[in-house]
Amino acid sequence: MQWIPVILILPYFILLLKLYRSLLKIKTFNASTDPAIFVSVVIACRNEQKNLPTLLNSIAKQSYPEDLFEVIIVDDGSTDKTFEIASEFAGISNILTLKNRGKGKKQALRTGIIAAKGNLIITTDADCRMGKNWIRIIAAYYELDRPDMIICPVQIETAPGIFRKFQELEFMSLQGITAGSAISEEPTLCNGANLAFTKCVYLNHSDNLHDEINSGDDIFLMYNLKKESRSKILWLESTDALAITKPPSTIRSFLKQRRRWISKGKSYKDRDTIVLGIATFVTIALLSSYFIAWLLFPVLTGVFLAILILKSVPDFLILLNTTIRYGKKKLMWWFLPAQIIYPFYVLSVLFYSLIFRENRNINSPFPKEI
């Protein structure tokens, strides 16, 4: 009977090994030709006067021809100089600044995408920055395979401190799952900070993005697209396609962000995501409870070690693969401490989310997310 928890963790072990095997199939994309399609970059933002200039300067330095892309900034009721900064920016010849026709991030994106001239839409956030070949590599990848959606890599800024290293490692894990699930044609995650899709795909599903929830414009669009049997959702592996974003700077903002992520979970209907979510929750609940039990009852050492190994092996493989691809292998020094801390952190966030429920409604300004 005492070994039943080990059996319960096997689904997690198998699912993550499957994702790791998918990661081994990754091939870096290099554009062999110059794309020639018109691209619309849409950015929804609110009170981003500090971050927006860095993003706009990154886009202004793009190697893609200026006459083949536009930038649409949609201001969602900013109380600072966000709108003025975007309107007066002279580094991009084809830039359009709009006021949100409604309220909230989803409506802001909808406002911008409807106004877009291009069929290929790229979304990002105001606190991101990217390299000079960002638009070019995404456009080239689209021209090659004509996918409905392209999931692009995101990385958070590197900074000293234990808290920041933990965030980086966790984010690497999420990126590994994002890439692995997309490559296995069962995508479970994506990030609107670096996402591309066609305008027609968006318009076909824009009425079913759960506007009652403040966030999730990216993930719900992907889930709707997955329901279509002929849809094509691809992962783009390229350092040129990378977007670097700022993580939450305080523990409080970090917990609030994770609470927003969790709040979307009750609306998830995607089978792959639900199965992975249940397997993950069961695993971390068992690992944390048996860690405490092992401290009290050493006789459970064998069971605890078996649980720890079954969780850690696929986690390690996915993280090692991902950190190497991102040039962040040194983060693996934090792997073992994080394995013990992570289950308690997840349970703490769950309890935090239950105690401090999101009380914002759809008419409130959207929160900034990674």
Image (cartoon, helix red, strand yellow):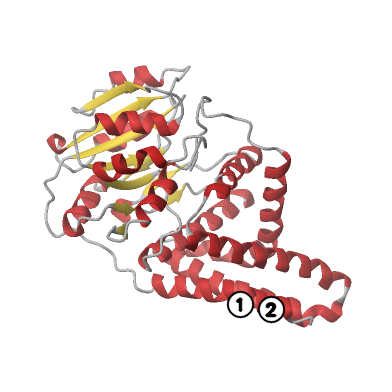
Determine whether, in the image, residue 270 is placed left or right of residue 255. Answer: left
Q: Is residue 222 left or right of residue 289?
A: left
- Residue 76: which quarter of the image? top left
* Picture quarter with the N terminus: bottom right
Q: Position of residue 265 (x, y in %)?
A: 56, 49
In the rendered image, residue 334, in percent from the top left (x then y), is placed at: 60, 62
Q: CA distance from mark 1 to mark 2?
A: 7 Å
Q: Which mark is residue 6?
A: 2
Give the total number of marks visible in the rendering.
Answer: 2
Q: Residue at x 51, y 51 (%)?
A: 268
Q: Quadrant of residue 307?
A: bottom right
Identify residue for label 1.
10
- Image vertical order of residue 137 relative to residue 328, above or below: above
Placement of 98 over or under 348, stated as above or below: above
| SS under mark 2 | helix
Q: Is residue 99 visible?
A: yes
In depth, the one of 342 and 230 nearer the eye is 230
Which residue lies at the image location 38% right of the left edge and 74% below the top edge?
24
Callout 1, which amino acid?
Leu
Q: Label 1 crowding class (10 Å Cα cut-off): few <14, some 14-19, many 20+? A: some
Is residue 212 shown left or right of residue 84? right
The reply to whether discs 1 and 2 touch (Cβ–Cβ < 8 Å) is yes
Q: Secondary structure at mark 1?
A: helix
Return the residue nearer the eye: 174 or 364: 364
Image coordinates for residue 229, horizontal then vertical, percent: 31, 61
- Residue at 44% from the left image edge and 32% from the top image edge: 105
Q: Who's the residue at 54% across and 58% down the image?
A: 169
